[in-house]
Amino acid sequence: MASASASLFKSSIVLDKSEWVKGQTLRQSSVAAVRCNPAAPSSLTIRAGSYANELVKTAKTIASPGRGILAMDESNATCGKSLASIGLENTEVNRPAWRTLLVTVPSLGEYISGAILFEETLYQSTTDGRKIVDVLIEVWCPLLVPMMRWCQGLDGLASRSAAYYQQDAHFAKWRTVLSIPNGPSALAVKEAAWGLARYAAISQDNGLVPIVEPEILLDGEHSIDRTFEVAQKVWAEVFFYLAENNVQFEGILLKPSMVTPGAESKDKVSSATVADYILKLLHRRIPPAVPGIMFLSGGQSEVEATLNLNAMNQSPNPWHVSFSYARALQNTALKTWGGRIENVQAAQEALLFRAKSNSLAQLGKYTGEGESEEAKKELFVKGYSY
Ligand code: 13P
């Protein structure tokens, strides 16, 4: 099954993603996109064409100091699992109630520069009848963009992207998943990289900043060295094919998983070690032209994800190194809410605290003070999907 989320900034875009697990593709996407930028003189010129300046501006705005992305693009099924964890049913009343809580946190825009939405959210209203998208754009930041999740692959992506740009979307997200146990095969890596590159090129052709997300799952007992080895290969191929597709690097954002031991490994490593591995890999593989590296949390605890990010920002980096977390931003807020109206304010304060902690981590100033036991709980779930 493939899923893709789109994210963004002031408008939404549509995206797809293909997932590869254990060397197998779960969804076959094919079809080359049609270039639809009449200004581009040939298929070998750089992507983006007349959108080039806008893409750079969008990417820079998302990657602004002390800010990151709130990923809230869980599919309805995955949202249902979150709701079940607090004893709520997965209904069209409870999902908007939770999403309303997330998007109406006052001042969240100080720490969050964009939100990734599931497709349904694009059309949902808050519990008091306002369109969620309007709330995001007005309350947080005029540049916020909704994201959507689509499962249609590359087919029709160009026209869908163009349509969402018309609706004011500014960025999109495509997540491709690779698994380390028993893989990933060279073919899986190549296909994942190619799909991400095609999506990125199509997005830029249509004015959307592509968030490129090659996620290497935490599942497994492997060491941090094995994760490093796989990530090195995956990132190299992704950037090779991005270049082959003439993607403008200044107009993309990379959303990778962190380089850590597998979640089932006996090895425990410090945040400083995780940061050493990641920074080494970033320097080896990612051109400084890429404005932002927006990490996913992947099942780490909220505190662990924040500590790791903080460790990466202890000295200046060529890129804005930040967060685009779902679980590691939402968990404590969800548990605090528990589906009770009287807990909404406390839950929103918990989300604000998390966002502020990660904002400090983006600046390398997070101290770990004031963290709850809930925030220290590991969030890894074997075979987790969106
Ligand atoms: P997590 O931070 O929960 O891994 O989510 C990442 C993601 O890609 C959601 O858009």
Image (spheres, grey):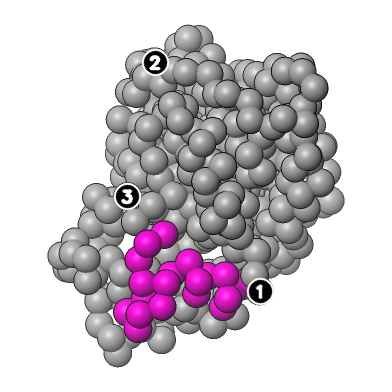
According to the picture, the residue beneath numbered tag 3 turns out to be 75
Q: Nearer the viewer, mark 1 or mark 2?
A: 1
Residue type at numbered disc 1: Glu
- The answer to whether the residue labelled 1 contacts the one labelled 2, judged by CB atoms less than 8 Å apart, is no
**Residue depicted at 29% across the width and 56% down the height:** 79
According to the picture, the residue beneath numbered tag 2 turns out to be 23
Question: The C terminus lies in which quarter of the figure?
Answer: top left
Q: From the viewer's perspective, is 318 left or right of 47?
A: right
Residue type at numbered disc 3: Ser
Residue type at numbered disc 2: Gly
Task: Give SS at disc 2.
Answer: loop
Q: Residues in magenta?
A: 122-141
Magenta stretch: residue 200 in it? no
**Residue depicted at 63% across the width and 30% down the height:** 36
Q: Closer to the N terminus: mark 1 or mark 2?
A: 2
Magenta stretch: residue 139 in it? yes
Vertical order, 205 against 300 (above or below): above
According to the picture, the residue beneath numbered tag 1 turns out to be 110
In this view, the residue in front, 147 or 331, is: 147
